[in-house]
């Protein structure tokens, strides 16, 4: 629809009828095509012309000839109707749990395994759904979620806010990564306090995993000596392999081991992080988003503490 110069809103019917009139340039033929009475169509055209403040047709010998004003109106009417049609199609797709788009943000550290596994399984089950994907760090995912720019976050730690619905999915044990030839490398497990004099490779604040690192070191009674601050866990492991220091990292999957690094499980019971699914609970979720969230939760369903890891 369109707001006219007198403040009245032209209805979709008026715009659609005008387009048919412009195409046929004949009142009777247009009325027949639209299945409306000719006087009704004539009155609608009169209202539209009064609203735009100019005649849209030249009347010659009981026929209608689209004039310069009408050509401008036809261009914008077609554009408006096309936009309304596109909006209806997008809304219908969003309301269909078998179609639509899910806006998903996820951590760099799960981009190579958890996210592809989930997307592959879901798309096999619901092939009509598309995804808008954003790779980010935890605090950025939290900001995107609160701003309404994503539907779902796969993240850690748990985003702040009572309006966030959080489902714990996967708990990762944390390790101390040391260079392959490091004196501590022969341990089956390690107390973090034993590494208090080592230089640490860490993530930069305010990345959530940096908070976990600082809290674990504080529990062990020391403040880490920082050798390097990075932005991705994979980068940290690479610098450990290069002998720059040690790092606290999630226990890697067997196919993701960094060459030249030994991974020592930490004995501290708090040495874990939980990957979870976050939604905003203060707004209704489109059916396709609700379906995806339920699918992911069911896929990872197992006893797990609700927390930020």
Image (cartoon, helix red, strand yellow):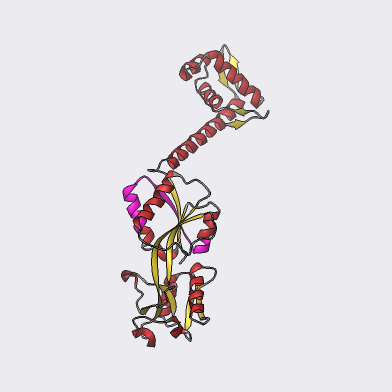
| Residue 125 part of the magenta segment | yes
Residue 236 or residue 62, whichever sits in front: 236
Residue 43 or residue 149, whichever sits in front: 149
Picture quadrant of residue 189: bottom left
Picture quadrant of residue 154: bottom left
| Residue 215 part of the magenta segment | no
Who's the residue at 48% across and 36% down the image?
88
Q: Which residues are magenta?
A: 117-140
Q: Position of residue 216 (x, y in %)?
A: 48, 76
Residue 55 or residue 237, whichever sits in front: 237
Q: Furthest residue to the right?
A: 6
Q: Position of residue 78 (x, y in %)?
A: 52, 31
Would residue 46 appear left or right of 309 to someone viewing this image? right
Observer able to see residue 51: yes
Observer able to see residue 55: no
Vertical comparison of 136 with 282: above or below: below
Vertical comparison of 100 with 298: above or below: above
Who's the residue at 59% across and 23% down the image?
67
Who's the residue at 32% across and 48% down the image?
125
């Amino acid at each position: 629809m369109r707001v006219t110069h007198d403040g009245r809103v032209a209805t979709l019917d008026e715009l659609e009828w005008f387009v048919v009139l412009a195409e046929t340039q004949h009142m009777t033929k247009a009325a027949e095509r639209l299945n409306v009475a000719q006087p009704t169509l004539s009155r609608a055209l009169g209202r539209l012309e009064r609203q735009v403040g100019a005649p849209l047709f030249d009347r010659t010998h009981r026929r209608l000839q689209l004039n310069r004003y009408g050509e401008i109106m036809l261009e914008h009417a077609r554009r408006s109707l096309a936009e309304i049609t596109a909006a209806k199609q997008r809304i219908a797709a969003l309301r269909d749990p078998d179609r639509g788009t899910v806006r998903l943000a996820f951590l760099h550290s799960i981009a190579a395994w958890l996210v592809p596994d989930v997307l592959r399984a879901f798309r096999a089950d619901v092939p009509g759904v598309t995804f808008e994907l954003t790779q980010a760090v935890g605090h950025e995912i939290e900001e995107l979620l609160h701003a309404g720019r994503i539907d779902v976050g796969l993240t850690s730690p748990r985003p702040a806010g009572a309006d966030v619905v959080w489902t714990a999915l996967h708990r990762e044990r944390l390790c101390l990564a040391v260079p392959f030839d490091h004196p501590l490398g022969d341990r089956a497990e390690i107390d973090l306090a034993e590494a208090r004099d080592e230089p640490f490779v860490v993530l930069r604040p305010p990345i959530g995993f940096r908070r976990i690192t600082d809290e674990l070191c504080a529990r062990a009674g020391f403040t880490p000596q920082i050798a390097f601050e990075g932005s991705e866990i994979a980068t940290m492991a690479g610098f450990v392999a290069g002998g720059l220091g040690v790092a606290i990292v999630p226990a890697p999957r067997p196919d993701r081991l960094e060459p030249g690094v030994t991974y020592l499980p930490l004995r501290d019971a708090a040495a874990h992080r939980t990957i979870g699914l976050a939604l905003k609970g203060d707004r209704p979720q489109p059916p396709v988003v609700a379906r995806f969230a339920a699918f992911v939760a069911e896929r990872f369903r197992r006893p797990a503490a609700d927390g930020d890891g």
